[in-house]
Image (cartoon, rainbow, N blue to C red):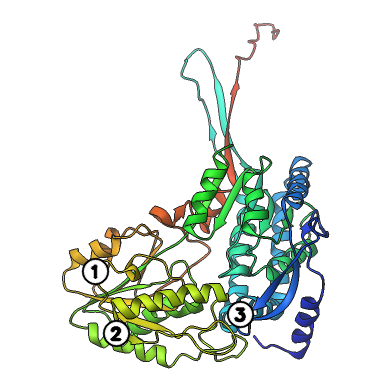
Amino acid sequence: MQTTQDTVSRVASYLAGSHPPLIDGQRRPAFSGNTFDTRNPATGEVIAAIQEATSLDVDLAVEAARAALNDRRWTGLSADARARVLWRYADLLERDAAELARLEVLNNGMPIAFANWMVSASAQWLRYYAGATPRIHGRAVGDAASDPQRRLHAYTVREPVGVAALILPWNGPIGTFIMKVAPALAAGCSCIVKPAENTPLTALRLGELAMEAGIPPGVLNILPGFGPGAGAALVAHRGVDKVSFTGSTLVGKQIVRSAADNLKRITLELGGKSPCIILEDADLETAIPAAAMGIFANSGQVCFAGSRLYVHQNVYDRVVAGIADFAAHLKIGSGLEPDTMLGPLISARQQARVEEYLSIGGKEAETVCGGTTLQGDGYFVRPTVFANPATGSRLLTEEIFGPVLVAVPFTDLDAVVSAANDTRYGLGAGIFSNNINRAHQLAARLQAGNVWVNCYGVVHETMPFGGYKESGWGREMGTEGMDAFLETKSVFIHLPDLPRENSQGET
């Protein structure tokens, strides 16, 4: 996707503008009057000032969302009409794809190729849920009576869960926005999106495109702000019926405790410490680059990153050396450069966190490559491979969220399954083997919501995505993703016997 000078100018103009919340179809000044800076992680420079939404803005957004739900300004449209709006929304994403991708790179730091893919995939996800909108239906039961003297007709109805608070992470802003908003809108919900404070820009722009597509006022609201402010107020608000959150396991647990007061419906997509297993019969020409990008993609800032590598002893040295060589040839730099493959981390704070693990790795494992940050502007960390970690090392148990891989040799399949499952997380797992029977058997034994065989990190709109254990509750994407925004109502209708006619035709 080519970036033209016109795209550069439009993005620069957008950044220089005002960035208040989007509530009830309008950009409204935040009640707090406060702003916060958002930065380009490749340089550390401030690129925009964002108006901070707080609890008062949350109240107004919930009121607008509830009014839109109650007067059926969205659900009152026919399913086909809603599908056409969502399809138009996808068209607008494609129309402004270059602008959105550039904005994403400036705010998040990801390579432009990854941002281009994310915009394209998001348009496809919107179309998938647009097509699902007319297929929301219940089922009928001809006679639901247990008493033979009565006749009952019964049926179910699928209805929107209500007002949905959608809280986004910073590592994939556009993708997670659409991953939540598309099924919520398809289900008929009114939505309030709280983007991560590090990356609010594309969420606000996507909100504007939604209004242009024809989403009615109040149906989609965007509140940029901080977790302890706008985020906590949204989760605790009694006018919110559903919370969908992607982020850390720690915050996910806090959301569960807060939502317990009125038993909000919750979907959580949380952390991971995913294993990648390479067997001795694997095609190493496939396995090495796939395992490498399983951890280095998006600078390791991926919830399902394959951060634990288990390699059969017979090919261990070759695989570890191959991944280190792959890492050495990754171009590190600004995501705006077309050949960049490894961008910066999101912030100085995240860089410092990863530096702590680099220090741990230097003491508890062998440093094969990397192990340092880059000096100069931006928040860059060299792609790092540690080998043969000490037993109980934090490298094997804690989510680092950076381009840091720890490699361990194995010989026994049962032992490696036990090691792979020895984690409080269960989001993803990779298997590389040319023995399809063994791959199936191993996939069945791994405690993870997503298992990739001879590939890594593939997602598709038709397939549910989520995790086991402390990696979350529920699923996103697929039909399961829309089910999370629907309630099921059972209706029973008593059917009395019809009056009988006599021989003269009278009743």
Q: What residue type is labelled 1?
A: Thr
Res 165 visible: yes
Quadrant that contains the N terminus: bottom right
Local SS, label 3? loop
Local SS, label 1? loop
Question: Of marks 3 and 1, which one's residue comes earlier in the chain?
Answer: 3
Q: Which amino acid does label 3 sit on?
A: Pro
Eye-nearest disc, 2 or 3: 3
The one of 359 and 187 positioned closer to us in this rendering: 359
Res 430 visible: no
Task: Rate crowding at label 2 as few (under 14), some (14 to 19) or many (20 or more) other CA atoms within 10 Å.
Answer: many
Image disc number at residue 320: 2
Kindly indicate the quadrant of the structure image that contains residue 444: bottom left
Eye-nearest disc, 1 or 2: 1
Residue 92 image point, x, y percent: 73, 71
Q: Does residue 89 appear left or right of residue 109 in this picture?
A: right
The one of 323 and 449 positioned closer to us in this rendering: 323
Question: Of marks 1 and 2, which one's residue comes earlier in the chain?
Answer: 2
Verify CB contact (< 8 Å) between mark 2 and mark 3.
Answer: no
Mark 1–mark 2 Cα distance, whole angstroms, equals 19 Å
Q: Check disc 3 and report the residue beneath it.
A: 41
Mark 3–mark 1 Cα distance, whole angstroms, equals 35 Å
Residue 493 image point, x, y percent: 60, 23
- What residue is at 69 percent from the left and 53 percent from the top? 192
Q: Check disc 1 and report the residue beneath it.
A: 391
- What residue is at 38 percent from the left and 72 percent from the top? 306
Verify CB contact (< 8 Å) between mark 1 and mark 2.
Answer: no
Q: What residue type is labelled 2?
A: Val
Mark 2–mark 3 Cα distance, whole angstroms, equals 30 Å
